[in-house]
Image (cartoon, helix red, strand yellow):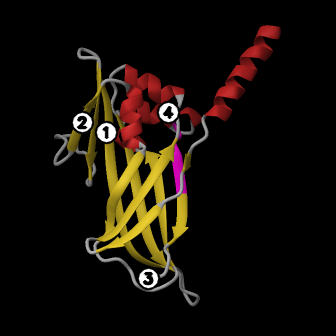
Amino acid sequence: MLAGVLAGLGLQARAEALTAEIGPMQLDRSDDGLLLSANLHFELPYQIDDALRQGIPMYFVADAQIQRERWYWSDQQLATASRHYRLSHQPLTRRWRLHISSTPFSSSGLGLALGQTFESLDDALASMQRISRWKIMDTAPTQSGVSVQLRFRIDLSQLPRPLQIGALGRSGWNLQLSRTQMLEDAP
């Protein structure tokens, strides 16, 4: 009985340790457009970590939505941007590979993607958790009342079919972060 209670406390402590959040976002207007920088803070759930170590690639998506508030209608969507991540483990070389693309990965290949190799999972995650000067809009908005929502999630639709079915409704396959921040008025 004591072992059951201790095991339950251990699972509860692990669940509490898996807090996920997006740190303060930095939004910069520049000649290139609207740039977003942010730090994501999360740990991979056990099921995702285990699948990665077994050689199954995991897919993640960062979405940015830029909206302007309106009092007479629903918010006006000014722009959206997405960044897709593919994280995989290569058992023969014992290295981790991270691909980043602005379009979803297809089954025929990676398409146009930036690929990086890392020695450890922690290094690969650190790279994925740091978003720096991501261009989310071609021209920075000048009107007031503009908000930017950043969402980061695991893309279960890219998993192999047997894992998609097993992952539905299970909290161990759930990784979602979200933060909304108002854009300061232009000077």
Q: Residues within 10 Å of mark 1 (few under 14, many from 20)?
A: many
Q: Earlier in the sequence, mark 2 or mark 3?
A: 2
Mark earlier in primary sequence (4, 1): 4
Residue at which label 2 appears: 116
Label 2 sits on a secondary structure element that is strand
Determine crowd level at label 2: few under 14, some 14-19, many 20+ residues with C-alpha closer than 10 A. Answer: few
The picture places residue 152, in percent across and down from the top left corner, at: 46, 50
Q: Secondary structure at mark 1?
A: strand
Q: Residues within 10 Å of mark 3 (few under 14, many from 20)?
A: few
Tell whether label 2 touches label 1 (CB within 8 Å): no
Q: Disc 1 marks which residue?
A: 86
Is residue 93 on the magenta stretch?
A: no
CA gap between label 2 and label 4 equals 19 Å
Q: Nearer the viewer, residue 8 or 25?
A: 25
In this picture, which residue range is highlighted in magenta?
173-178
- Quarter assignment of residue 34: bottom left
- Give residue 44's mark: 4
Q: Residue 186, labelled with which disc?
A: 3
Q: Quadrant of residue 172?
A: top right
Say if 44 sits above or below 143 in the image: above
Disc 4 to disc 1, C-alpha distance: 14 Å
Residue type, label 2: Gln
Q: Are marks 3 and 4 in contact (CB under 8 Å)?
A: no
Q: Amino acid at mark 1?
A: Arg
Secondary element at tag 4: loop
- Picture residue at 41% right of the left edge, 62% below the top: 64
- Residue 185, placed above or below residue 21: below
Q: Is residue 91 left or right of residue 111?
A: right
Position of residue 3 measured from the top left corner of the image (x, y, whole percent): 77, 9
- Mark 2 or mark 3: which is in front? 3
